[in-house]
Image (cartoon, grey):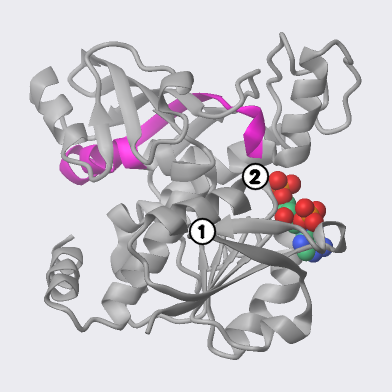
Amino acid sequence: MGFRIGVVGATGAVGRNMVEVLEKSDVVVSELRLFASERSAGQTIMFKGSEVRVEVLTEKAMREGFDYLLFSAGADVSRKYAPIAADVGTTVIDNSSAFRMVPEIPLVVPEINGKLLKGYSGIVANPNCSTIQMVLALYRVHDRYQLHEIFVSTYQAVSGAGHKAIVEYERQLTGDMTHNVFPRQIAHNVIPLIGDLKNDISQEEWKMINETRKILNSQSISVFPTTVRVPVRIGHSESVIARTLFPIMSKEDLIETIASGEDVVIHDDIITPLEIAGDDDTHVSRIRLFDAHTFGLWVVADNLRVGAATNAVRILKLHSQLNCASSTESEIEVAEVERR
Ligand code: A2P
């Protein structure tokens, strides 16, 4: 036995990572299907030693019924195809922004609000990459001291804008400085705008504001982001200054609290995106306690993994454990999630 799984957008920057993370995981896959646009028809991608042919995405294929479909082909593709798949009983884990703020659709970081997956079927939204690593660094502090305000500046890798963005950046490194994907040259530069502006706030910044509140289940947290693209291939970095309602006992307690987060690693020394590319943890360094209510962090994670593919596969694993639990290990996992 095993799961019938499909990846939609399998040839993209995140899609390829979804296949790799699935391959590395202990998820038992009985069949893997890969979908992309007509441009990729005929390509193959390796999975567990076999070449899997990339198929053109069609409504008919979406109606076939899968155990899980992982989507990362943009919001328009998700809006059109994800409901078709969900209608025939497939659990869709969608990496796009299409459904994240729909009230009935769970927006899940498994370590934080994985319990929402219990008894749920349909579309599950995978949050924005910058939001995931920030809330992973902060959620235990929120549990203990209640977050009140978060001021965050991001330093986001080009791969977050997809395969075309990586190609544009690499072309610029060879001297061709034309740009189509980014609003300015990105090589040797930084760009303080990600997505279009709405009321002076960029799309990426709105995502961090709204998604943080939804994931942490608190409308009273104020988030003040500035999102910036930097000439880094993989790995988003964030400078986070946060304020709590209740006084933090000590710096040691703050460190212990952050470190108690699942899949969160604390570093005494500085940590940089180059060092964590390909890794599945969220890395925190430069921890500063400015006063009893105010602290600062430097948070780094692989945006394609922690911020996208790994979170999606963690959702898949937890969903399957919570809803198809049969082994003792699954029962322990269920009990742990229920305690959270
Ligand atoms: P393709 O490679 O055939 O264009 P990225 O985020 O790196 O740009 O990747 C986007 C992914 O979404 C790619 O796999 C891309 O396929 C896929 N994609 C984009 N548009 C469509 C579409 N209309 N139908 C199916 N797949 C699409």
In the displayed structure, 335 sits above or below 254; it is: below
**Residue 22 located left or right of residue 244:** right
Number of the label disc, if any, that sits on residue 13: 2
Asked whether residue 196 appears in the rendered view, the answer is no
Q: Earlier in the sequence, mark 2 or mark 1?
A: 2
Number of the label disc, if any, that sits on residue 262: none
**Tags 2 and 1 in contact by the CB under 8 Å rule?**
no
Amino acid carrying mark 1 in the image:
Gly
Quarter of the rendered structure image containing ligand 1:
bottom right
Q: Position of residue 273 (x, y in %)?
A: 47, 22
Name the residue rendered at 39%, 79% in the picture.
2
Q: Residues within 10 Å of mark 1 (few under 14, many from 20)?
A: few
In the displayed structure, 290 sits above or below 142; it is: above
The quarter of the picture where residue 55 lies is bottom right
In the displayed structure, 297 sits above or below 264; it is: above
Quick one: which residue is furthest to the front in this view? 49
Q: Nearer the viewer, residue 28 or 165?
A: 28
Secondary structure at badge 2 equals helix
Q: Is residue 340 magenta?
A: no
Q: Which residue is mark 1?
A: 49
The quarter of the picture where residue 43 lies is bottom right
Amino acid carrying mark 2 in the image:
Ala
Name the residue rendered at 72%, 75% in the picture.
81
Q: Position of residue 48 (x, y in %)?
A: 48, 60
**Is the distance from the Cβ of mark 2 to the nearest ligand 1 atom less than 8 Å?**
yes
